[in-house]
Amino acid sequence: MIKTHGDYKQRLHDSFYKQGLMQTLNCKLGEVSAGKVEAIMPFDDKFTQQHGYFHGGITGVMADNAAGYAAFTLFEEDDSVVTAEYKINLLAPAQGETIIARAEVIKSGRTLSVVKSDVYTRLNGQEKHVATGLFSIMRLIGAAKKEI
């Protein structure tokens, strides 16, 4: 059984929506459960590359954010989160009406958690797997009060 602390969903929601970048990207939380987070962003041509696909940087941001918050769901109530390292493989052009990142904790450690994040696009009701990343997420013990 996965151990959570307090109202992790509310803490995650509050922290996620404090991020100016997520507001700029119009990114929203989707499904959230212990050790798992989904983030969804609608297409916007301001965030494309020269061929009209979601830019690879957006794909990375989505994977990273979902991974960090998946780890966050298992942290203590006064902890916060930052990414320590990641590797992402772009598998296909990210073309669609939305981009969706789904992350799941592989190992939740005292200081570092390892998280897998898969990114999909949705076009005409069909999902396409466009990226997979592996993330090292750092727990910032007692740092929740330092969030803006």
Image: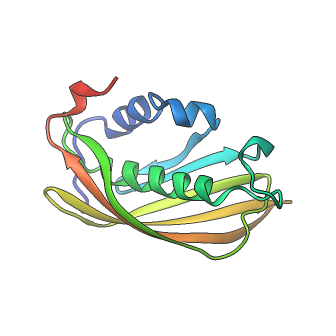
Q: In this view, does 142 lie to the left or right of 25?
A: left
| Figure label count | 0
Rendering coords of residue 100 (x, y %) = 62, 55
Rendering coords of residue 4 (x, y %) = 24, 48
**Residue for point 26% across, 61% down:** 113
Is residue 41 positioned above or below 14 on the image? Answer: below
Q: In which quarter of the image is the N terminus?
A: bottom left
Residue 73 visible in image: no
Q: In this view, does 102 lie to the left or right of 52?
A: left
Q: Is residue 105 left or right of residue 26?
A: left
Rendering coords of residue 29 (x, y %) = 54, 42
Residue found at the far right of this picture: 124
Rendering coords of residue 93 (x, y %) = 73, 69
32 and 21: which is toward the camera: 21
**Residue for point 20% across, 39% down:** 79
Q: Find residue 80 and report its image quarter.
A: top left
Residue found at the far front of this picture: 50
Q: In this view, does 82 lie to the left or right of 32?
A: left
**Residue for point 55% across, 36% down:** 22
Is residue 148 positioned above or below 34 on the image? Answer: above
Q: In which quarter of the image is the C terminus?
A: top left
Residue 122 visible in image: yes
**Residue for point 35% across, 57% down:** 35
The scheme the figure's colours follow is: rainbow
76 and 53: which is toward the camera: 53
141 and 55: which is toward the camera: 55
Q: Find residue 109 and report its image quarter.
A: bottom left
